[in-house]
Amino acid sequence: MPKTSGSGRIFKNPVLEKLTRTHIAAPLVAFSAVSTYLLYQAVVAKGIGGLQVLVWFLGGLLLYSLVEYIMHRFVFHMPETTPARKKFVYTAHGVHHDFPRDKDRLAMPVPVSLALSAILFFVFRFAMGDFVYAFLPGILMGYASYLWVHYMVHAFQPPKNAFKIWWVHHGIHHYKQPHRAFGVSTPLWDIIFGTMPEQQK
């Protein structure tokens, strides 16, 4: 059963253990700044029109939400059929399921996520040219929105408005049906792929 308080340990080495912890503000600030810079470059330096920027940005958001769903469902919840898989799943995600209230384990370390972002920039620039300046910010802000929603769900009480949908959806994943409700930033792909929570009596 998930713990309502406390924190799990991933590494015995205290330095490595410290590096697994990230304050939620750090990635939110970093990706907002990077996205703003890239969008500025798209409009001012590359001369991409506003409508094109919006379409590519929304495309990045949509792609991020799909990748989020796929990673959560098929990577972080892969069958633990070997000791190596079991170790990977626990390190990447299982510790979060054991200690869902641990606020410092809700985001990937910023240096790691920025390095991945740099790789994505060059990959997408090769594929789509200057449109990467509008497309990648959509992905990065999709990730930032995931982080913010995820943090709010685990750190705050459910609100009494429409945003409660996210709390209920993710809460079902954690506490009732861990093999359903994989979408965090949106339930869209759960609806499309048939992994919405089952109705319980």
Image (cartoon, rainbow, N blue to C red):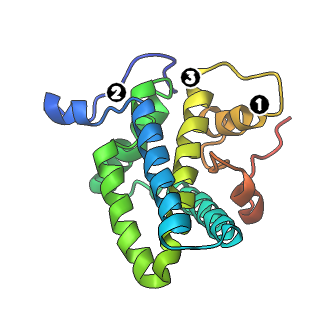
**Which comes sooner in the sequence, label 1 or label 2?**
2
Name the one closer to the observer, 33 or 13: 33
**Coordinates of residue 23 in the picture (x, y in percent):** 39, 29
The answer to whether residue 69 is left or right of residue 9 is right
Residue in the picture at 45% in, 38% down? 29
Please tell me in which quadrant of the rendered image residue 177 appears: top right
The answer to whether residue 119 is left or right of residue 167 is left
Name the one closer to the observer, 35 or 47: 47
Q: Secondary structure at mark 3?
A: helix
Q: Label 1, on which residue? A: 164
**Coordinates of residue 198 in the picture (x, y in percent):** 78, 46
Q: Is residue 75 visible?
A: yes
The circle drawn on residue 86 is none
**Which comes sooner in the sequence, label 1 or label 3?**
3
Real-space CA distance between mark 3 and mark 2, rounded to the nearest whole angstrom: 17 Å
Q: Label 3, on which residue? A: 155
Could you classify mark 1 by the number of other residues whose Cα lies within 10 Å: few (under 14), some (14-19), or many (20 or more)? few
Could you classify mark 3 by the number of other residues whose Cα lies within 10 Å: few (under 14), some (14-19), or many (20 or more)? few
Mark 1 against mark 2, which lies toward the viewer? 1
Name the amino acid type tagged 3: Ala
Q: Secondary structure at mark 1?
A: helix
Real-space CA distance between mark 1 and mark 2, rounded to the nearest whole angstrom: 27 Å
Q: Label 2, on which residue? A: 8
Residue in the picture at 53% in, 75% down? 131
Name the amino acid type tagged 2: Gly
Real-space CA distance between mark 1 and mark 3, rounded to the nearest whole angstrom: 13 Å
**Which comes sooner in the sequence, label 3 or label 2?**
2
Residue in the picture at 43% in, 43% down? 93
